[in-house]
Amino acid sequence: MQAIIRRDSRAWHLQVWISFATAIFLAAVGLAYLPGTDLDRAFMIMGYLFCLTTAFVLAKLVRDIEQAVTAGAAADSPLFKYMVWAGFSIAMGLTAWGLMRMQISEPYKAFLGVSWLYLITCAFTLAKLLRDQQEAALAERGRVAQ
């Protein structure tokens, strides 16, 4: 019996990429027109980028752990797991702290906060889409090789 290789629909791919692009655009607009100081703007840009990169790393770690458990193999070292979770937590915490302490209007803080969280959720969704796509391609290559 052959295993069924599940692929996401084109509509789902389009939705994920459009959502991610929209999140990047909204975050960029919010940061570009940030009424705070240049230092506030630089801090928030760094915070958004830190959160974005750690979200992708965390998504990969969680997926690798799941695969290792399924395969009965060794997962990443406990120290690496701690570092990834700590990095993500620090990125989210510092960005939230920076956002809350800024002397800007509440509606603008809300816009920045929502665009930031939208960006992070879209990053996790995009990471899953790309990993699923890679796994399906590897499974198809393995099927062809047999």
Image (cartoon, helix red, strand yellow):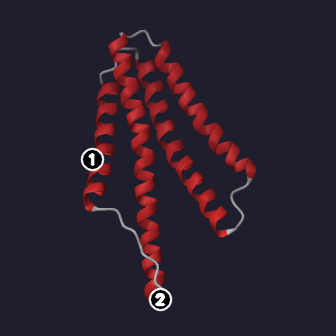
Q: What element does badge 1 sit on?
A: helix
The residue furthest bottom is 146
- The answer to whether residue 10 is above or below residue 117 is below
- The answer to whether residue 89 is above or below residue 36 is below
Q: Which x, y percent locates residue 58?
A: 56, 47
Q: Which of marks 1 and 2 precedes in the sequence?
A: 1
**Residue 21 located left or right of residue 44:** left
Residue 145: which disc?
Answer: 2
- Label 1 CA crowd tier, 10 Å (few <14, some 14–19, many 20+): few
Query: Viewer-proximal residue, 1 or 48?
Result: 1
**Residue 129 located left or right of residue 30:** right
Q: Residue at 28% of width from left, 40% of height from top?
A: 22
Q: What element does badge 2 sit on?
A: helix
Q: Amino acid at mark 2?
A: Ala
Residue 18: which disc?
Answer: 1
- The answer to whether residue 76 is above or below residue 86 is below
Q: Which x, y percent locates residue 10?
A: 26, 61
Q: Indicate the quadrant where residue 27 lies.
A: top left
Q: Amino acid at mark 1?
A: Ile
